């Protein structure tokens, strides 16, 4: 789990931009979804062996 947090931290920054618990939770879910989509894209881009 720790590499995921480090990768998101590197791409997005140290702090969440939105204030309030509900908005911060939604922002984190969006960041996690984008991270997962980027991982799927990289797996798909690799040539088949």
Image: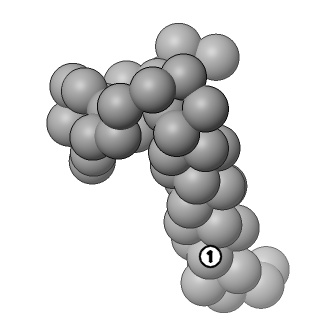
Q: Quadrant of the C terminus?
A: bottom right
Q: Report which quarter residue 44 is drawn in.
A: bottom right
Q: Report which quarter residue 15 is drawn in.
A: top left
The furthest residue to the front:
20
Where in the figure is residue 21, as x and y percent of width and height? 54, 22
Where in the figure is residue 34, as x and y percent of width and height? 56, 61
In this rendering, position of residue 46 left or right of residue 15: right
Name the residue carrying label 1.
Answer: 41
Numbered disc 1: secondary structure: helix
Decide if residue 10 is in sight here. Answer: no
**Nearer-the-camera pick, 33 or 15:** 15
Q: Residue at x 37, y 24 (%)?
A: 6
Q: Is residue 30 above or below residue 25?
A: below
Decide if residue 18 is in sight here. Answer: yes
Q: Quadrant of the N terminus?
A: top right
Q: Residue at x 52, y 39 (%)?
A: 23
User: Disc count in the image?
Assistant: 1
**Nearer-the-camera pick, 13 or 16:** 16
The colour style of the image is one colour
In this rendering, position of residue 35 left or right of residue 10: right
Where in the figure is residue 39, as x and y percent of width and height? 61, 59
Q: Is residue 49 above or below residue 10?
A: below
The furthest residue to the right:
49
Q: Badge 1 local density, few (<14 within 10 Å), some, or many (20+)? A: few
Q: Residue at x 77, y 84 (%)?
A: 48
Q: Residue at x 20, y 36 (%)?
A: 13
């Amino acid at each position: 789990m720790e590499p995921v947090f480090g990768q998101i931290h590197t791409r997005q920054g140290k702090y969440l931009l939105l204030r309030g618990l509900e908005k911060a939770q939604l922002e984190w879910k969006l960041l996690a979804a984008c991270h997962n989509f980027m991982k799927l894209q990289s797996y798909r881009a690799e040539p088949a062996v």
